[in-house]
Image: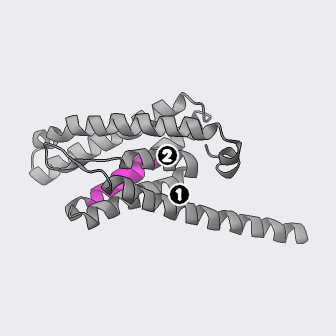
Amino acid sequence: MEHTMEQGRTAASHKVKMLVVTGLFIALGYVATTVLMIPSPTGGFMNLGDTVVLLGAYLLGPVYGAVAGGVGPALADLLGGYGIYVPATLAIKALMGLTAAWLYRALHKKSWALLVCGAAAETIMIAGYALFDGFLAGNLLAGMAGIPSNLVQAAFGLSASTLLAMALRKSGYVRRQFPQL
Protein backbone atom coordinates (compact mmCIF):
# COMPACT_ATOMS: atom_id res chain seq x y z
CA MET A 1 0.00 0.00 0.00
CA GLU A 2 2.80 2.44 0.89
CA HIS A 3 4.56 1.69 -2.39
CA THR A 4 1.38 2.58 -4.33
CA MET A 5 0.97 5.84 -2.39
CA GLU A 6 4.60 6.73 -3.07
CA GLN A 7 4.09 6.09 -6.79
CA GLY A 8 0.99 8.31 -6.68
CA ARG A 9 2.92 11.15 -5.04
CA THR A 10 5.72 10.77 -7.56
CA ALA A 11 3.29 10.83 -10.49
CA ALA A 12 1.51 13.89 -9.07
CA SER A 13 4.84 15.62 -8.44
CA HIS A 14 5.92 14.90 -12.01
CA LYS A 15 2.66 16.27 -13.39
CA VAL A 16 2.98 19.47 -11.35
CA LYS A 17 6.57 19.88 -12.54
CA MET A 18 5.52 19.41 -16.16
CA LEU A 19 2.68 21.92 -15.81
CA VAL A 20 5.02 24.50 -14.27
CA VAL A 21 7.71 23.98 -16.91
CA THR A 22 5.06 24.12 -19.64
CA GLY A 23 3.95 27.47 -18.23
CA LEU A 24 7.53 28.66 -18.29
CA PHE A 25 7.88 27.59 -21.92
CA ILE A 26 4.64 29.41 -22.77
CA ALA A 27 6.17 32.56 -21.26
CA LEU A 28 9.48 31.93 -23.06
CA GLY A 29 7.62 31.41 -26.34
CA TYR A 30 5.80 34.71 -25.87
CA VAL A 31 9.00 36.58 -25.01
CA ALA A 32 11.03 34.97 -27.81
CA THR A 33 8.32 35.91 -30.28
CA THR A 34 8.05 39.52 -29.14
CA VAL A 35 11.52 40.54 -27.94
CA LEU A 36 12.99 40.75 -31.44
CA MET A 37 10.40 41.33 -34.11
CA ILE A 38 11.93 41.89 -37.52
CA PRO A 39 9.30 43.14 -39.97
CA SER A 40 9.03 41.00 -43.08
CA PRO A 41 8.31 42.49 -46.48
CA THR A 42 4.99 40.61 -46.56
CA GLY A 43 3.53 42.39 -43.52
CA GLY A 44 4.25 39.86 -40.78
CA PHE A 45 7.40 39.58 -38.72
CA MET A 46 10.28 37.22 -38.13
CA ASN A 47 11.20 36.32 -34.57
CA LEU A 48 12.96 33.88 -32.25
CA GLY A 49 9.81 31.97 -31.30
CA ASP A 50 10.50 28.83 -33.35
CA THR A 51 13.64 28.22 -31.33
CA VAL A 52 11.55 27.93 -28.17
CA VAL A 53 8.79 25.93 -29.90
CA LEU A 54 11.30 23.28 -31.00
CA LEU A 55 13.35 23.26 -27.81
CA GLY A 56 10.16 22.93 -25.76
CA ALA A 57 9.09 19.99 -27.90
CA TYR A 58 12.38 18.17 -27.27
CA LEU A 59 12.39 18.87 -23.53
CA LEU A 60 8.68 18.48 -22.75
CA GLY A 61 7.57 15.80 -25.18
CA PRO A 62 4.63 15.82 -27.60
CA VAL A 63 1.67 16.89 -25.44
CA TYR A 64 3.24 19.51 -23.18
CA GLY A 65 5.53 20.64 -26.01
CA ALA A 66 2.54 21.17 -28.31
CA VAL A 67 0.68 23.18 -25.66
CA ALA A 68 3.67 25.40 -24.89
CA GLY A 69 4.61 25.73 -28.56
CA GLY A 70 1.13 26.85 -29.55
CA VAL A 71 0.04 29.04 -26.66
CA GLY A 72 3.15 31.24 -26.24
CA PRO A 73 3.35 32.46 -29.86
CA ALA A 74 -0.46 32.72 -30.09
CA LEU A 75 -0.41 35.04 -27.06
CA ALA A 76 2.25 37.10 -28.82
CA ASP A 77 -0.06 37.47 -31.81
CA LEU A 78 -3.03 38.32 -29.61
CA LEU A 79 -1.21 40.94 -27.53
CA GLY A 80 0.86 42.24 -30.45
CA GLY A 81 -2.02 43.30 -32.64
CA TYR A 82 -2.11 40.26 -34.92
CA GLY A 83 -5.36 38.87 -33.51
CA ILE A 84 -6.47 37.43 -36.83
CA TYR A 85 -3.45 35.08 -36.70
CA VAL A 86 -4.16 33.67 -33.22
CA PRO A 87 -6.06 30.54 -34.36
CA ALA A 88 -3.56 29.81 -37.13
CA THR A 89 -0.54 30.37 -34.90
CA LEU A 90 -2.00 28.25 -32.13
CA ALA A 91 -2.65 25.36 -34.53
CA ILE A 92 0.55 25.68 -36.59
CA LYS A 93 2.95 26.06 -33.66
CA ALA A 94 1.23 23.32 -31.62
CA LEU A 95 1.47 20.99 -34.62
CA MET A 96 5.14 21.94 -34.97
CA GLY A 97 5.79 20.99 -31.34
CA LEU A 98 3.79 17.79 -31.56
CA THR A 99 5.52 16.72 -34.77
CA ALA A 100 9.05 17.56 -33.63
CA ALA A 101 8.64 15.76 -30.29
CA TRP A 102 6.90 12.72 -31.76
CA LEU A 103 9.48 12.30 -34.55
CA TYR A 104 12.33 12.83 -32.10
CA ARG A 105 11.04 9.95 -29.98
CA ALA A 106 10.40 7.80 -33.06
CA LEU A 107 14.00 8.38 -34.18
CA HIS A 108 15.25 7.28 -30.74
CA LYS A 109 16.47 10.72 -29.65
CA LYS A 110 19.61 10.64 -31.80
CA SER A 111 21.52 13.92 -32.18
CA TRP A 112 21.07 13.92 -35.96
CA ALA A 113 17.32 13.53 -35.44
CA LEU A 114 17.16 17.10 -34.10
CA LEU A 115 17.79 18.41 -37.61
CA VAL A 116 15.29 16.05 -39.23
CA CYS A 117 12.58 16.75 -36.66
CA GLY A 118 13.16 20.49 -36.72
CA ALA A 119 13.07 20.56 -40.52
CA ALA A 120 9.78 18.63 -40.55
CA ALA A 121 8.29 21.03 -37.99
CA GLU A 122 9.50 24.10 -39.86
CA THR A 123 7.98 22.74 -43.06
CA ILE A 124 4.64 22.72 -41.23
CA MET A 125 5.18 26.35 -40.25
CA ILE A 126 6.04 27.47 -43.78
CA ALA A 127 3.15 25.58 -45.40
CA GLY A 128 0.70 26.49 -42.64
CA TYR A 129 1.25 30.23 -42.90
CA ALA A 130 1.28 30.12 -46.71
CA LEU A 131 -2.12 28.39 -46.65
CA PHE A 132 -3.53 30.71 -43.98
CA ASP A 133 -2.26 33.84 -45.75
CA GLY A 134 -3.72 32.49 -48.99
CA PHE A 135 -7.03 31.94 -47.22
CA LEU A 136 -7.00 35.51 -45.87
CA ALA A 137 -6.13 36.93 -49.28
CA GLY A 138 -8.56 34.67 -51.10
CA ASN A 139 -5.69 33.60 -53.31
CA LEU A 140 -3.24 30.78 -52.61
CA LEU A 141 -0.57 32.41 -54.78
CA ALA A 142 -0.73 35.56 -52.62
CA GLY A 143 -0.23 33.38 -49.56
CA MET A 144 3.05 32.13 -50.95
CA ALA A 145 4.56 35.61 -50.83
CA GLY A 146 5.55 35.04 -47.20
CA ILE A 147 7.51 31.86 -47.90
CA PRO A 148 10.95 33.54 -48.30
CA SER A 149 10.78 35.31 -44.91
CA ASN A 150 9.36 32.17 -43.28
CA LEU A 151 12.28 30.19 -44.73
CA VAL A 152 14.70 32.59 -43.00
CA GLN A 153 12.83 32.24 -39.71
CA ALA A 154 12.74 28.46 -40.13
CA ALA A 155 16.48 28.27 -40.77
CA PHE A 156 17.23 30.32 -37.69
CA GLY A 157 14.79 28.42 -35.46
CA LEU A 158 16.12 25.07 -36.67
CA SER A 159 19.77 26.07 -36.20
CA ALA A 160 19.38 27.70 -32.81
CA SER A 161 17.16 24.98 -31.33
CA THR A 162 19.47 22.22 -32.58
CA LEU A 163 22.55 23.86 -31.08
CA LEU A 164 20.80 24.53 -27.77
CA ALA A 165 19.38 20.99 -27.56
CA MET A 166 22.79 19.48 -28.32
CA ALA A 167 24.39 21.59 -25.60
CA LEU A 168 21.66 20.68 -23.08
CA ARG A 169 21.99 16.97 -23.91
CA LYS A 170 25.54 17.11 -22.55
CA SER A 171 24.30 18.03 -19.09
CA GLY A 172 23.54 15.07 -16.84
CA TYR A 173 21.28 17.29 -14.74
CA VAL A 174 19.21 18.32 -17.75
CA ARG A 175 18.99 14.71 -18.98
CA ARG A 176 17.72 13.61 -15.53
CA GLN A 177 15.17 16.40 -15.34
CA PHE A 178 14.04 16.02 -18.97
CA PRO A 179 14.44 12.39 -19.98
CA GLN A 180 12.56 13.20 -23.22
CA LEU A 181 15.70 15.01 -24.42
Any part of residue 11 in sight = yes
Q: Which mark is residue 55?
A: 2
Name the kind of residue labelled 2 in the image.
Answer: Leu
Q: With respect to residue 78, does 32 lie above or below?
A: above
Residue at 34 percent across and 41 percent down: it is 124
The percent position of residue 24, horizontal first and vertical second, equals 50, 62
> Which of label 1 and label 2 is nearer to you?
2
Question: What residue is rendered at 43% in x and 49% in y?
Answer: 53
Q: Between 71 and 175, which is closer to the camera in this rendering?
A: 175
What is the quadrant of residue 17 in the picture?
Answer: bottom right
- Front residue of 175/8: it is 175
Task: Answer whether residue 88 is magenta in the image.
Answer: yes
Q: Magenta stretch: residue 90 in it?
A: yes
CA distance for labels 1 and 2: 12 Å
Query: Which portion, as a residue range, is magenta?
Result: 86-98
Residue at 47% across, 49% down: 98
